Image (spheres, rainbow, N blue to C red):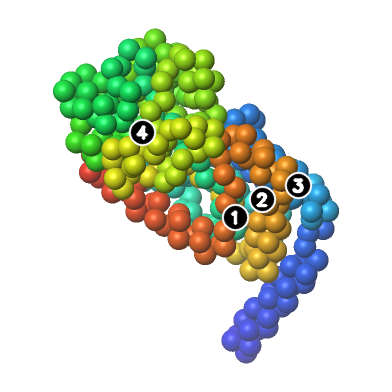
């Protein structure tokens, strides 16, 4: 009798979920963004959200929950009902954070992937006084001056920190990490020479490079970018195999019905192809992607393995 009741309950739950999926969506959808309003991630979220809302016939409400490098946003999303009315914007930061600090979430356990939204390269930039006009010259200069070059990042365990440690390992150089609480605080020191080089986003670095305040040597990704077509990739310039990009994706709480995830995947990927959305993403120095849920899951798994290896080899420890 108990087994029969359990089977009936499971069937009723499945039928209810199927019914909910068939009527989805019938109210606004909340998109949790793990930063305060403003910045590339928030801009892309709002651009995608606006067009997605028009497509599905209901408002996409952007809920900015900054703090603790995305942990506050992730925790809020993981506790939301798995009904498709709460989705989370994610990035490499939420993959890296658990590798260094104790957090309440596990991306693989607590979330269901929907799609990868975008990808973007970083700019490798140097202070104008650094006598290096190319990546190979920067590497040679660093090797000739071990421990004398400082690089900036947006904090311990940030992707910029880890990708520069990867660059350091692959070029066999000795450089010193200087963490900042925000990228806007790092640029004045890069311009003045307090730090000598840094990887930064295209959108934040471009104004300083175009104004001649700093010099860009290359881009970090696997291919050149439209904003700086003259710049080579780090890999083609001097470090074969080096390729790192920032990326953004969307997740739903685990348990969200498969039909709803498939619906969101289809609608969001269609939205990414809209010229207005693609242009808005490109304006942030990014490139629209659109993927299957399985592809995003595989990407997150690969990112976790990659950065865990970098952290181990560099001996990086969390400080919380």
Is residue 252 rendered to the left or right of residue 221?
Answer: right
Q: Are marks 1 and 2 in contact (CB under 8 Å)?
A: yes
Specify which label sits upstream in the sequence, 3 or 4. Answer: 3
Q: Residues within 10 Å of mark 2 (few under 14, many from 20)?
A: many
Disc 1 from disc 4: Cα separation: 27 Å
Query: Which residue matches tag 1?
Result: 290
Mark 3 vs mark 1, CA separation in Å: 15 Å
Q: Is residue 285 visible?
A: yes
**First reached walking from the N terminus: tag 1 or tag 4:** 4
Q: Quadrant of residue 9?
A: bottom right
Q: Residues within 10 Å of mark 3 (few under 14, many from 20)?
A: many
Picture coordinates of residue 23 (x, y %)? Answer: 80, 66
Find the distance from the CA under tag 3 to the CA under tag 4. Answer: 34 Å
- Kind of element beneath mark 3: helix
Q: Is residue 193 above or below residue 291?
A: above
Q: Are marks 3 and 1 in contact (CB under 8 Å)?
A: no
As measured in the structure, the alpha-carbon distance from the residue carrying label 2 to the one carrying label 4 is: 29 Å
Which mark, by number, is residue 51?
Answer: 3
Q: Earlier in the sequence, mark 3 or mark 1?
A: 3
Report how far apart the C-alphas of labels 1 and 2 lie in the structure: 7 Å
Task: Using the image as rendered, state which of residue 218 and residue 155 is in the foreground.
Answer: 218
Please identify the quadrant where the N terminus is shown: bottom right
Q: Earlier in the sequence, mark 1 or mark 2?
A: 2
Residue beneath label 2, please? 272
Q: Earlier in the sequence, mark 2 or mark 4?
A: 4
Image depth: mark 2 or mark 4 in front: 2
Residue receiving disc 4:
161
Q: Give x and y (percent) for residue 26.
A: 82, 58
Residue 103 visible in this rendered orientation of the protein: no
């Amino acid at each position: 009798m108990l087994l029969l009741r359990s089977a009936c309950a499971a069937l009723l739950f499945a039928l209810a979920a199927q019914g909910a999926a068939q009527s989805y969506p019938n109210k606004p959808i909340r998109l949790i963004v793990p930063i305060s309003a403003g910045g590339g991630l928030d801009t892309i979220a709002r651009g995608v959200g606006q067009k997605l809302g028009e497509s599905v016939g209901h408002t996409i409400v952007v809920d900015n929950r900054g703090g603790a490098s995305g942990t506050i946003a992730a925790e809020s999303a993981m506790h939301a009902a798995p009904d498709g009315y709460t989705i989370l914007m994610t990035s490499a930061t939420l993959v890296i954070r658990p590798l260094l600090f104790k957090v309440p979430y596990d991306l693989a356990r607590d979330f269901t992937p929907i799609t990868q939204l975008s990808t973007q390269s970083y700019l490798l930039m140097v202070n104008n006084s650094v006598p290096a006009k190319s990546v190979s010259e920067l590497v040679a200069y660093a090797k000739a001056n071990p421990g004398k070059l400082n690089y900036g990042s947006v904090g311990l365990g940030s992707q910029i920190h880890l990708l520069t440690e990867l660059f350091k390992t692959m070029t066999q150089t000795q450089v010193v990490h200087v963490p900042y609480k925000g990228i806007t605080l790092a640029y004045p020191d890069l311009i003045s020479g307090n730090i000598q080089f840094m990887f930064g986003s295209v959108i934040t670095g471009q104004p300083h490079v175009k104004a001649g305040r700093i010099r860009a040597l290359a881009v970090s990704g696997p291919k050149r970018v439209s904003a700086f077509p003259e710049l080579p990739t780090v890999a083609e310039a001097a470090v074969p195999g080096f390729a790192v990009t920032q990326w953004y994706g969307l997740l739903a709480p685990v348990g969200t019905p498969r039909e709803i995830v498939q619906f969101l995947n289809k609608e969001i990927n269609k939205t990414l192809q809209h010229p207005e959305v693609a242009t808005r993403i490109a304006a942030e120095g990014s490139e629209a992607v659109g993927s299957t849920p399985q592809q995003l899951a595989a990407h997150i798994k690969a990112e976790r393995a990659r950065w865990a290896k970098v952290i181990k080899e560099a001996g990086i420890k969390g400080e919380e």
